[in-house]
Structure formats: structure tokens, C-alpha cells
Image (tube, helix red, strand yellow):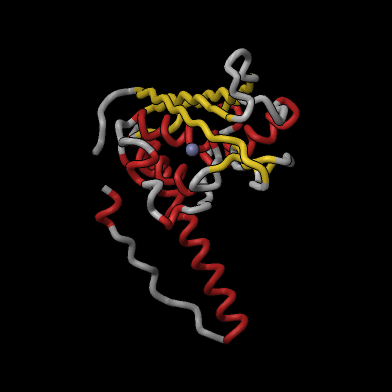
Amino acid sequence: MRLSMDTRIGFGYDSHVFSPGVPLIIGGLSLDHPEGLAGHSDGDVLLHAVTDALLGAVAAGDIGTFYPPNDARWKNADSAIFLDTALEEIHNAGYRIANIDVTLILAKPKISPIAADMRARVADLLRVNINQVSIKAKTPEGLNLDHVAQCHAVALLRQISEEEGLKAMEAVIENQRQLEDVVDDLLSSVHGVPKRRVDPVYDTDDIT
Ligand SMILES: [Zn+2]
């Protein structure tokens, strides 16, 4: 469903319990820590909150709508998959990310020494610049929740202009052509397969 507003805002929240013997993954990074976040997937509390913020911004439900926790397919799943679904949803609705702002709440480990790496990783996963991603962290002061990691995320989206949409499409087509050229070259050099003479036909239905 294509929405028609200049900007949209979304909020996401998530929490997971620390558990021994589980790898700790936050913001798509593996962190060296004796405990990890227990969850059906990889327990990435940050990516889950961001996924919900993105889905919320285009009123597309939440992470559970797309990936029910009782579905065995998503056991130990890489949470980047959830994020990709959210990116697809906002793109289909006609939006791109303006910026996201995240607050992690956890007693340990300390996030500040790795916050820059984490921002870079999340920006990568979201396919935006690092200056569009803010990650802050606090300890759960007075909450008595040292065994839990919580995350709050806000996402601001901006409508994709027709010009931007066309540019993005051109880039995809350009990449596909380059890829096919490389494959053709490889095939002809390795197997002596002659280069394809006919240009591939693109599905113009998708370019409307
Ligand atoms: Zn979660």
C-alpha cells in the first residue's frame, strides 16, 4: 500500500533476558561477553526494536506479524532477515529512512567503546550513511533489571520522490547488467561458451 505523506515516524521497543552459554549479538555485531540474549531468533534486541520502528512507521504491523515466534523456521534466525523485510515494506510504501535513533538499556557490557562499530554495522544493514544512525546506551538505573537488555528505537522516514525512485531503479538495472557481463565473461573464458548476443528483456511491468 502506497501512503501519501512527506514524512512518517515509527517507534519500536524490545527486551530480552541475558542467559549463559548464548552468544551475545547486538546491532548485528557479535560481542565478547559470558552471557547472551535468549530469544527464539538470535535475540538481537536492537535490530528487533529498529525493525518494529520501521514497520510501525508505515503501519505494517510488527515483527511478529511477519515472523511468528512459534514458527520453527525462525529459530536462531539472523535478525538481519527481519530488518530486510521491514526495509522492503517501507520501500513498497514509498519511503526511505531519514534517520533512526536508538537507546539501549543494559547493565553490561559497556556499549560506548563499540558504539561506533555498531553504528557502522547497523547503517550497513539499513543501507544508509552512518550519520543517519544514532546509538546510545544507558544502564538500567533503579529498575532492578540488570539481567535484561531493553531497546527503544525511533525511525523517521521520508517519502521517495519520483526522481529518486527512478534513480534507484536505474542503479539496480545497471548492477544487473554488470553482473551478467561478468558472468558471461567468466563463462566464455572458462568453458568457451560464446557470449550471449541478445540483451536480456526486463519486466517493464515493474518499472511503472
Ligand atoms: Zn526481540
* Residue 86 image offset from top left, x and y in percent: 40, 40
Horizontal side, residue 79 vs residue 56: left or right:
right
* Residue 105 image offset from top left, x and y in percent: 59, 23
Q: Residue at x 65, y 35 (%)?
A: 118
Q: Residue at x 42, y 55 (%)?
A: 173
- As displayed, is residue 145 above or below residue 175? above
- As displayed, is residue 159 above or below residue 21? above
**Front one among 101 and 170:** 101
Q: Residue furthest bottom?
A: 192
**Front one among 79 and 73:** 73
Location of the N terminus by quadrant is top left
* Residue 91 image offset from top left, x and y in percent: 37, 40
Horizontal side, residue 138 vs residue 98: left or right:
right
**Front one among 134 and 127:** 134
Q: Residue at x 37, y 41 (%)?
A: 64
Horizontal side, residue 149 vs residue 173: left or right:
right
- As displayed, is residue 60 above or below residue 101? below
Count of labels in the image: 0
* Residue 130 image offset from top left, x and y in percent: 61, 31
Q: Residue at x 42, y 30 (%)?
A: 53
Horizontal side, residue 114 vs residue 174: left or right:
right
